[in-house]
Every structure is written in C-alpha cells, then in structure tokens.
Image (spheres, helix red, strand yellow):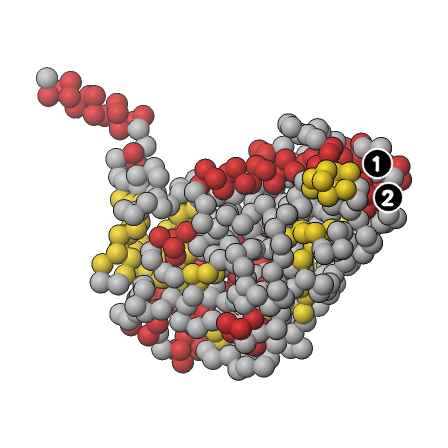
Amino acid sequence: MKKLLLLVTILISQITPPSAFAQSYEADVIVYGGTCAAVTAAVQVIKSGKTVLVVSPDKHLGGLSSGGLGFTDTGNKSVIGGLAREFYHRVYQHYDTPGGWQWQKREEFGNKGQGTVAMDGAERTMWIFEPHVAEEVFEDFVKENNIKIYRDEWLDRSKSGVQKANGRIASFKTLTGKTFKGKMFIDATYEGDLMAAAGVKYHVGREANSVYNEEWNGIQAGVFQHRHYFAKNISPYKVEGDPKSGLLPYVTAEKIGKNGDGDNKIQAYCFRMCLSSHPDNRIPFAKPAGYDPGKYELLARVYKAGWTETFDKYDPIPNRKTDTNNHGPFSTDFMGQNYDYPDATYERRKQIIKEHELYQKGLMYFLANDPAVPADVRTKVNEWGLPKDEFKDNGGWPHQIYVREARRMLGQSVMTENETLGKKAVQQSVGMGSYSLDAHNAQRYVKEDGFVQNEGDIGVHPKTPYGISYGSIVPKKAECENLLVPVCVSASHIAYGSIRMEPVFMILGQSAATAAVQAIDSKVAVQDVDYGKLKEQLLKDKQKLEL
C-alpha cells in the first residue's frame, strides 16, 4: 500500500507543476503591474541586491510603450536618464543593424521624432519604434536579471485581498488564490488598484482651479490648445438643426459647468493603433460586430464642412508603420465613455475596453468604406491596415488601451501646475518631467447656440524641465508605510497631463525601487527614507534630478 501511495505521489509530482502546491510567494519587494515602470522597478531592485517578484495582470510587458505608443512623448530628452535611457539605447541598437529593417530601408524612414530626431547617432538612442521591438527589450531586461514574473495574475480587490498590519501591507492575494508577501510593495499599474485596496486615498476627475490655486484645471470650455475641436458650426442633432430629433451618438445632453469648476470627468482613452502600409504586412479593416455607420454621422458632417486633416497624426515609425493617435474634432478618442473606468470592477473595465475597441474598429471601417467620407480619404485609408507582425495573438490589435488617466494618489505631497510650470520649487526630486501639460478632451456637449463642441483639450508648455517630488510617489504615512506608487502619482489632473508620459514612468519606477531598497536597509517607512542617500544613489545610477 505504501509503495502504491509513493508511486501515485511521484506520478502526481511529474504532471503537476510545483506552483500548484506552493500558493504563497515571498520577496523583499513585490511589484504589481506589467507596465514599463514595473519592469524598470524590478530591474533596479535586482541591481540593488534584493529579491523581487513581479505580479502582472498583463501577459505582455511594457504597457503603452509596447502597446502602440512608439512615437515617444520625449519632451526634453536630456532629462531622461537611468534605465529609461538604457531602454531607448537598446532600441537604437536594434535599429542600428540591417535586421531591424524588414519592410523598409533605413534611409527611406527619415529621422523624424517628436521634438527630436528619431534616431540619435550621437547619443545612441532611438525614440521611435515598433511595439514588438519595445516588448523584446523589456523581456530582455527580465531575462538578463532573472526576474520572476507571475503573468495574468489579478489582484483580489475584495476587502480580504490586501492584508495590512501596523500600517503596512503584509501581503496580497490574486484571484487565482496565490499570496504574495513582501517587505515593500510597488503599485506600477495605470489604475492604482493595489494603492486603492491598501486604503490609500486618491482622486478621480478634474479638481477645481481653487483647490490648488491653478489656472488650467477643471472645466475649460472654449479653450482650444490643439486642433481637436469643431472649428465650424456642426449640428449635434439627428436631424440637422432640430433638437426634437434627439442627439447623435457620443454627444452629452448634460449642461456644461462653469470654467474652472471641478467634475468627475477624465480625459478620453483610445487605442494607439499601429498600422502598416506594406501590402504584404497589412490586414484590411474589417467590419466589427454591431457596426452602425450612424455612430459616425458627426464625422460625416465634419467632412462635409471641408475638414482635411485625417492623416495628421499618422506618425511614422520604422518599417512602413505608424503610431496612429487621435486628431481632430471626431477621431479615435472615445470621449465621455470612460468616466467609471478607474473604480470599475474588472468585468466592467473589460466591457469599457471592448466598447472602445468596437468604436475604433468601426471608425476605421467607416473611413475606409463609407460614401460620406471623401473618396481620396477612403483611397488613402485603404492603403493602411493592422500589421500582421504586431500583436500576433490579438489579430494585430493592441493589447493595452491608452489609460491616459485613472486614479491619482493623494500622497505626501501633490504635484500641481505650479510646480510643473516653475512657479513653485520642487522638494526632493526623484526624476524630471518636461512634456506639455497635455490633457485630451473630456466631453462633447451642445453649446448655447445649438452647435456641438468638445471640451477639456489642454496643452501648456513648461518653460523648462521640472523635478518630480519624492512625496508624490509615496502615500501619507498614516495610510501606508511600505508602498510606492510611480504611475498613479500624487498630482492634480492638469499636472498629471505632463507627468503621465512613458519615459517618466520608467524613471519613477526606477526611483521608487531605489527608495524601497533603502527603506528595507534602514528599516524605516518609505516616508522616512534619507533623501540625501536616495539622491546620491539615483545620481550614481544616472538619473536626472535637476537642470
């Protein structure tokens, strides 16, 4: 009998992975998330001599950096240092070889980046890239540092999901039943789920200007910083000029508030589509389920009024591809359809993401086929398609929706437009930002004159790069002593519009990890880390902290 039991045990052990028996995992630092910040944080922990586990709800690493946003929002590239710069250097190395150019000759690409050259030979950095190349770089970081990643593991957001003791996170569970214990935790998600589940206070929506003595926060009707507005009078009604006929899709009947007032609205999301114009690497735009051309009637009216800017944000990336972003009054931004996303259940978020996907796929099918679209536009749109060699397990469609803004922590200190615009000094810098205060539209409404308009699109340029305070990536001490938050940072809506760029998230991920390691070594709360020592290490690791 004993021999039989032994034989059964051996057989079970051979067909059952060890992880099925071991449901509890432990490391010095637990990183929750699969974004670029999660990867740089994990790499920094390893380089600092500590153990780390990455618990990622995502199967693919890199978030937006590998999810279609290849036309990098660099801002002033001189303030991008550390592992972030190493990432862009490795991208350069990829495209500095003939193997990096499969669908296009290198000399045909040109060298246009966003405010910089795409490929900087002097600095050996490449700021414009294909999604799969970015993902390969992140995976290389993981392999080289032997980082253990648990993928498709979703935080249990119930009351029992996060265990705290003495003001600290002791562990958290995932929906598969796994438990992760650590001395320090880093929430590197776009949504801030671990932060929220740990009881850390946060804000969703736009603050009134009066809250932080700002100018560009809150409602901003009539402020047009980009060309994402209706420049001509367009009727929002099903029957033009007839309010009784009802509103067209995606126009709110809600009356707009006063300029400068706060609300619960957040800037629009979209997918940063990577499109290909190579005939051998192109999937034609298909009609999505539930397609209704009536959903795009506003765009038809915009074309009828003479609009000609369809392709202004088809930004070129290597190999005859584009990072395609929102542009114009009616585009890929699915305005007003994401307000509940930050606090939504996983099921509701999936629904929101699917709604965005169907809207955007329907938009592309409309542009390619509908007779209301000018013939020359239709012809040119049909020269593009989803790429066969990107997002192969998802039909060429990005894995990651562009969560431009979700929860924002109310941390030890709050970054506001006053710091980002240089009106107020920043204390204890752990990285730098430089991009414009960039918020996309938050709503589409009916003006008093009966015509449609968009609201919320802001783009205010800082005169110089600015520091991002250590206090903005740590909670208040009374709320949690061993958590750092490098993505859902403590910032006002409009300040976050600048901070929210992918290079900055990499920078803050690395700095958060450095602080976590020092908190462990000094046996202190993250709020009590010696900033002098932290600054010294960050500079040693080539982070840029001040001009």
Q: Residue at x 68, y 71 (%)?
A: 461
Q: Residue 279 vs residue 491: left or right?
A: right
Q: Amino acid at mark 2?
A: Lys
Residue at horizontal 50 percent and vertical 72 percent from the top: 211
Contact check, label 2 and label 1, Cβ < 8 Å: yes
Residue 105 location in percent, x, y?
79, 47
Where is mark 1, residue-wise?
A: 372
* Nearest to the observer: residue 306 or residue 130: 306
Q: Residue 254: where, in percent of width, then height?
A: 61, 51
Residue 51 point in image, percent of width and height: 34, 56
Secondary element at image label 1:
loop
**From mark 2 to mark 1, how far is it between C-alphas?**
8 Å
Query: How crowded is the residue under tag 2: few (<14 C-alpha within 10 Å), some, or many (20+)?
Result: few
Task: Residue at 48% x, 50% y: name it.
Answer: 342
When asked about the image quadrant of residue 185, the answer is bottom left
127 or 68: nearer the eye? Answer: 68
Q: Which mark is residue 304?
A: 2
Residue 329 placement (x, y as % from top left) = 75, 51
Q: Nearer the viewer, residue 313 or 204?
A: 204
Amino acid type, residue under disc 1 in the picture: Ala
The answer to whether residue 120 shows anywhere in this view is no
Give the class, few, some or many, for how many residues have Cα within 10 Å of label 1's Cα (few <14, many ≥20).
some
